[in-house]
Structure formats: C-alpha cells, structure tokens
Image (cartoon, rainbow, N blue to C red):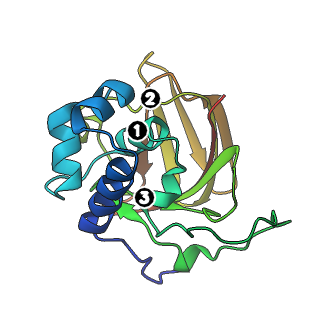
Amino acid sequence: MSSTPHPLIDRAQVGARLRAIRKHQKLTLKQLSERSGVALSTLSKMELAQVSVSYEKLAAAARALSVDIAQLFSPGKQGGSAVQPTAVRTAIDGAAGYSTGNYDYHPMAGDFPGRSMTPMYARIFARELSQFEDYIRHPGQEFAVVLSGRVRIQFETGESLRIGCRETAYFNSAIGHIYLAEGEEGAVAEVMVVMSEY
C-alpha cells in the first residue's frame, strides 16, 4: 500500500463547518445536543477545536443536522447544478481526513448528492481496547475490507473477528465495535469501510 501521507483536515476547520451548519439552521448547541445525543460540552469543544472526537460523534451531529458527514470535511457546494451525476471519482491519497488519534478517517465520494452509503478509508493505529473510552456504535450496517495489514474487530458482546489483507467483514454497526491493528509494534492497518444508515 502507498506510504504517501494522507491529508488530514485541521479539526478547527471541522469545528467551524459544524458551527456554520448549526448556525445556518438556527439551532443552539443545546438543541443539537438533544437531537444528536452528543453531550453539549462535547459539541462545544468540537466547534472550538478543543478535542478530537470519534466518527460516531461526528456522524451523530451530521445526522442531527441532516447533512452528509462529508460536508464537515469539505466545503459544500452551495447551489450548484441540479443534474444528478452518474458517478463521482475520489482518490484515496487526496481525500481529506480527520484524526482521532486511534484512527485517521477519510470520507470518500462526499460530493455525490443524496448518498445512501458512507464509504470511508481509514488508517488504524490503535492496538488496545484501553485506548478507547467506549465502543463505537452508529445506526445501520458496516462492510470492511482490509487493504493492508491485519485488523481485529472487537465487539462489545465479547466476540472478535480477525481479518487480513483482502479479507472482509460485514456486521451490524449498532453493536459496539472497535478496530484494532495487529502485527508488529507500530504496524498500521489500512481499511476501506462502507456504512449504511439502515
């Protein structure tokens, strides 16, 4: 797999976009907290770039705002053409991402309007469950294929699934789960994940 550095968006930009979308919808932080289930203090810290948060919290905020999570990573096209594209192209190495410390997330195909799936390229650094405050949960289903390295997907049920390069997993993402890189110390796993909301 490519050792090219993948671009990471500054969390201040993500926070500013979150705030701009919330303000445009004339919502208070408290209202967004009630809609999303994300603590008001966490949302405030997200907007002020005081904390890196998990995909789960970003996705919950995006769902509550009725926007695609990709809009938090890149400026949305305002207005634009009413013509629905047949397809969009995204290069993994050029897709802006967001680091949580345990993972780097890079949403793909964010400019396809009305997506019913969320494809995401991720680099997995975490190696231990203790690196997480809690399991990640979000509505829908998740499909993952390992592009390089080895991954253990640990579920809150106590079950785990180990997959290597070119192997896949499909699971209910409402069940708490965590991706962990396996192999030599410092090994990073690369995974393509596709999530649905249903």
Residue at the limit of the structure toward the bottom, as seen here = 4
Mark 1 and mark 2 residues within 8 Å of each other at the beta carbon: yes
Q: Which residue is mark 3?
A: 72
Amino acid type at mark 3? Leu
Amino acid type at mark 2? Arg
Q: Which residue is mark 1?
A: 56
Expressed as whole percent of the image width and height from the top left, the position of residue 88 reads: 75, 70
Mark 1 and mark 3 residues within 8 Å of each other at the beta carbon: no
Q: Quadrant of the N terminus?
A: bottom right
Q: Residues within 10 Å of mark 3 (few under 14, many from 20)?
A: many
9 left or right of 143?
Answer: left
Expressed as whole percent of the image width and height from the top left, the position of residue 142 reads: 62, 37
Expressed as whole percent of the image width and height from the top left, the position of residue 63 reads: 49, 38
Amino acid type at mark 1? Glu
**Does label 2 or label 3 sit earlier along the sequence?**
3
Identify which residue is drawn at 49% across, 59% down: 71
Q: Residues within 10 Å of mark 2 (few under 14, many from 20)?
A: some
149 to 40, vertically: above or below: below
- Residue 94 image label: none
- Residue 137 image label: 2
Question: For numbered disc 3, what is the local secondary structure?
Answer: helix
112 to 159, vertically: above or below: below
